[in-house]
Amino acid sequence: AQSVTQLDSQVPVFEEAPVELRCNYSSSVSVYLFWYVQYPNQGLQLLLKYLSGSTLVKGINGFEAEFNKSQTSFHLRKPSVHISDTAEYFCAVRTDLNDMRFGAGTRLTVKP
Amino acid sequence: ETGVTQTPRHLVMGMTNKKSLKCEQHLGHNAMYWYKQSAKKPLELMFVYNFKEQTENNSVPSRFSPECPNSSHLFLHLHTLQPEDSALYLCASSQDVAGGFLELFFGEGSRLTVL
């Protein structure tokens, strides 16, 4: 079965600085990979997804992620963050039918 | 009208109460899910319904009882809950195709507090 590890539970960063949220997965088969964002008191919203093709995936709000098969990673990046990016970010992996596993989440806090 | 709507958004109940959470999806999807989100824990999949049939039950206690009358509506009936059941309950939907679904669409969640 696959699993997902988000290496940082909290990431504080100053406004306009770059940020990287790390995600590693374990799976012996092909995977689909996702990043979701959760703002306070809301549900999860899809940021981006990797299904196949180009390993660099662009999503909403200026985020992008790179699929690295050899390192089994799918790190999320943004070159310049805003206060409004403060939220919880979840990495997820799916292989089997109806089996999506989520990481424990990374709390991104953007400070002025 | 949002894609996946959950009601109520907040619920406080005693351990002997019976209550229900409701989820409705307006996306034309054919699969619906209940997830539990507790502090400091990954999301836990509770139930999956595909074409109204329950296809997964991840060892959830019987005090949680799901109901899926059609592909657009999903309920979670709650009875004699414990304080540790306090959490955010998230409903999601997906469009299943051959080989599985592509992504999940989530509602805003129902925050449950058990006293």
Image: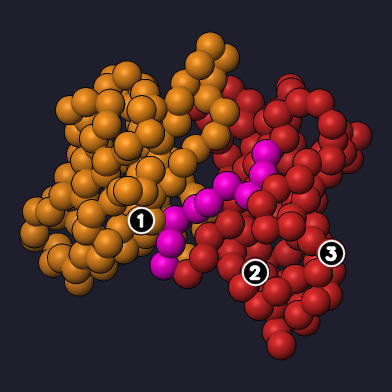
Chain colours: A red, B orange
Which quarter of the figure has residue A54? top right
Residue found at the very far left of the displayed protein = B17
Kind of residue sitting beneath label 3: Pro
* Horizontal side, residue B24 vs residue A53: left or right: left
Q: Position of residue A3 (x, y in %)?
A: 66, 40
Mark 1: which amino acid?
A: Gly
Tell me where the magenta segment starts and ends, as one range.
A41-49
Which of the chains bears the disc numbered 1? B
Q: Residues within 10 Å of mark 3 (few under 14, many from 20)?
A: few
Q: Are marks 1 and 3 in contact (CB under 8 Å)?
A: no
Instruction: Measure the C-alpha gap from mark 1 to mark 2.
Output: 20 Å
3 and 2 marks on the same chain = yes
- When asked about the image quadrant of residue B87, the answer is bottom left
What residue is disc 2 on? Answer: A85
Residue shown at the point (32%, 48%) measured from the top left: B1
Residue B36 — which label?
none
- Give the CA distance from mark 1 to mark 3: 31 Å
Mark linked to residue B109: 1
Query: Which label sits on residue A79?
Result: 3
